[in-house]
Amino acid sequence: MDYIQLFLGLVLLVVGGEFLVRSSVALSFKLHLSKMVIGLTVVSFATSAPELLVSLQAALNGFSDISLGNVIGSNIANIGLVLGITAIIAPLAIDKDFYKLNWPVMMILSIALYFILKSGMQISRSEGVALLLMLFVYLWILIKRAKKARGSEPTDDSIDEGLSKASNFKITVWLLIGGVALYAGSEFLVNGAVSLAEGFGISERVIAVTVIAVGTSIPELAASVIAALKKEKAISLGNLIGSNIFNISSVLGITAIIQPIAVKSEEVLTNDIFWMIGFAAILLPLVFLPKSYQLGRKRGIVLVVAYAIFIGLTVLK
């Protein structure tokens, strides 16, 4: 039964990723916003929904390690596993917004999370509100920049122009199908994976940063790989950076407002969060050295290997 859930989860996530990318591209035509902005907002929020639901449920049930481990592990998986695999499939071109806005915001939130957790060994309700406010400020800046840049973005011949004629009703239906399929797929995948992992006697924290984190990152993987194969590379990168920003600010922010999140395992602060900050930090030199503004196959392999090392060390410990 666990294996059936895993398979069904994967199928639903791939279907959800397809509909989500289709709706986000169509939405970018309607709003006259860049695909990077759509990836950072609509797609990121939809693919972060599984993390939010898992973290909230875990916190309400008293499993804070799962709430924190899920987000920290998902952020590591988004860069090491998902971005790595996406870059291997199709090298990604990087634009200036990456290092001028998106990457700095991701780094600031990652480091802020460490200090929030270290200072009081929990994320309080007021700190949850602060994280949400940071998200709103970021989105306000993002939309403001997008409006200024409107019309200056070069056209991409690989985009299906037919999507520009999609009705609002169709876009809404696609978005709903994508969101529901991603949610259901993540539920099946996580439930099946956790059940199998528990059979091997793996701890709550390890399950969270490995099995659950990968499970809830599958939507990002599905959406990003499909986007990369369709040459919608801006959405691939925007989706991942945006998801990491959403995971910390909205997932942990909303969860902490409803139920403060306590640090129960010492390894969260001494090991896991440093891996998360490290993966975020390494993106900048990878993008600029030796060839600027591109994340190619070799660098993708480096990220995937680094992620495999993280998983290996976590499980062995």
Image (cartoon, grey):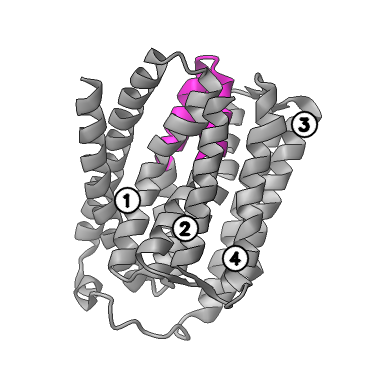
Q: Which residue bears the numbered disc 3? A: 118
Is 133 within the magenta? no
| Label 1 – label 3 distance at C-alpha | 34 Å
Is 65 within the magenta? yes
Q: Which residue bears the numbered disc 1? A: 222
Label 4: which secondary element: helix
> At which x and y percent is residue 25?
32, 66
The amino acid on which the numbered mark 3 sits, given as a three-letter code, is Lys
Q: Residues within 10 Å of mark 4 (few under 14, many from 20)?
A: some
| Label 1 – label 2 distance at C-alpha | 18 Å
Q: Which residue bears the numbered disc 4? A: 286
> At which x and y percent is residue 97?
58, 71
Q: Earlier in the sequence, mark 3 or mark 4?
A: 3
Q: Which residue bears the numbered disc 2? A: 301
Quarter of the image for residue 190 reads top left
The amino acid on which the numbered mark 2 sits, given as a three-letter code, is Ile
